[in-house]
Image: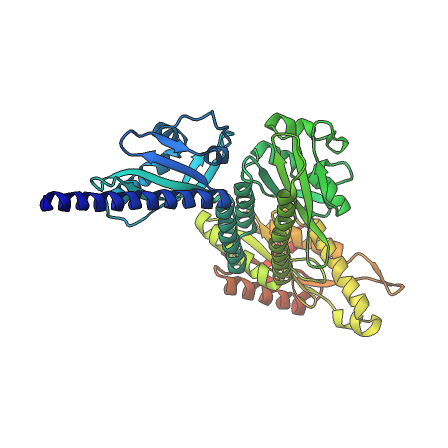
Amino acid sequence: MSESKSKTSSNKRQLRSESTAAHERSLSEERFSLALKGANDGLWDWNLETNEVYYSPRWKSMLGYEEDELENHLDTWVGLVHPEDKDRVLKTVEDHLSGIADSYEVEMRMYHKDGREVVVLPRAFLVNRASDDKSVRLVGTHVDITERKKTESYLENNAEILEMIAAGNPAPEIYHQIALMYEGRHPEMRCSMLELEDGVLMHGGAPSLPKEYCDAIHGLKNGPSVGSCGTSTYTGQRVLVENIETDPRWEKLKHIALPYGMRCCWSEPIKDSSGKVLGAFGMYYNHPALPNVEESDDLKSAARLAGIVMERDQAQKRIRKLAYTDELTGLASRAHFYQILEETIKACERHASRFGLLYIDLDDFKGVNDSLGHDAGDLLLQEIAHRLENISREVDYVARLSGDEFCILVKGVDDDYAVAHVAQRCLEVISEPIELSARKYTPACSIGIAHYPDDGDSLTAILKAADTSLYSAKEALNESFVSERFLSLASKLP
């Protein structure tokens, strides 16, 4: 009797314990459900024994579906998860079920009803059966972290682009990354950057636009009705074209854009720190549209970022120009000429070819500066440079070495007479009268000639030979262009 009462009492205590545990689980799940409603997360409840899965209305709407559009089965999730993420996520589930992992939390991509990807963060806990402590359910949430991931990706890409700018990467490489960064933020968007040079649109970067379209736009003169980018660079203002097909600013260009699916284009002028227009950033979609708030803000930030690159690139071009160009005459500088001469020597050595070098020195240039002033001297140098460029072929190279000294690299020389003819022509054009300070002045010069490889087979040797030839000519003939080696050639010229 006593033993029977003891068993009954034990059973009652076990029932009370199980009841209490069940009640606590019920309260826990109720609190969890209430917390989900407050957090606006999607709830799912996976029956591990039947593979039935309850998906809450919020879970379904997160992916664009109505409550009755998805079946409550694991296959629903299998059909919506990104194929590249499925096995990794299931492995995480297995690790949690087997006790290898204490918790279940993993990022994955799922497909929205409209086809775009949604990044979700599932978290879950196991529900065990009281009788045998076997895991029978996995209950969890889905949190939409797409925007957070987009922001993280944007910040990472932006940092990488700034590093590329600081490292001095070529502008086209950076334009490419800028376009891809904003295209990644807005699916189906295509971006382009155009540089502006003397009112002409020049292709900068557009990795997702057809090459044929980019080639057609490259070289167009900007103006008040030259598409979106041509108009924005002309006015310095943002241009939003909702429909390329009907907008009058695209009347002359829509036949280029429409065949490639472009239906709208928004353009923001790219400016430097002083407000000067350097180019334009364009955003395209394959459907008529105007930008929403996020797209509008991104259009502005993209133009600012591209502006940093363009301003840096133009500054570098100015530095290179100053290093390689004589500021007064616009001819090649001494440093650039020596670089070209070195390259020409190597090319001629490979191909067993020849070239000639003319070393030109103006006579009594100091007298012009002293009597007429330095402004008159500068004007004379500019005119001489212009005349030398006019008589030279495109393959030849003209440079101002210093003060009143010029050089001409004459390529493709077959015999000694060819360079002598060029020298004779230099004497003729240089000696044409010029008006300086209201006075008629007739310039004069002396010219030394050297040939590669006859007079020197290195940079130093060929320059020394031309310099020696110049001063020999000055001493021997006063107004000649040849050294003694070429006197007989000069006498044979017509």
Quarter-of-image position of residue 289:
top right
Q: In the rendered image of this protein, does residue 280 appear above or below residue 384?
A: above
Q: Quadrant of the N terminus?
A: top left
Q: Is residue 351 visible?
A: yes
**Looking at the image, which is closer to me, 92 or 87?**
92
**Looking at the image, which is closer to me, 98 or 412?**
98
Spot the residue most to the front.
1
**Looking at the image, which is closer to me, 57 or 92?**
57
- Measured from the top left, where is residue 405 in percent x and y? 67, 65
Relative to 329, is 74 on the left or the right? left
Quarter-of-image position of residue 266:
top right
- Measured from the top left, where is residue 429 in percent x and y? 75, 54
Relative to 100, is 178 on the left or the right? right
**Looking at the image, which is closer to me, 465 or 437?**
437
Q: Is residue 492 visible?
A: no
Count of residue discs: 0
The residue sitting at 42% across, 38% down in the picture is 43
- Measured from the top left, where is residue 47 in percent x and y? 31, 33
What scheme was used to colour the molecule?
rainbow
Spot the residue most to the right.
438
Q: In the rendered image of this protein, does residue 491 appear above or below residue 219?
A: below
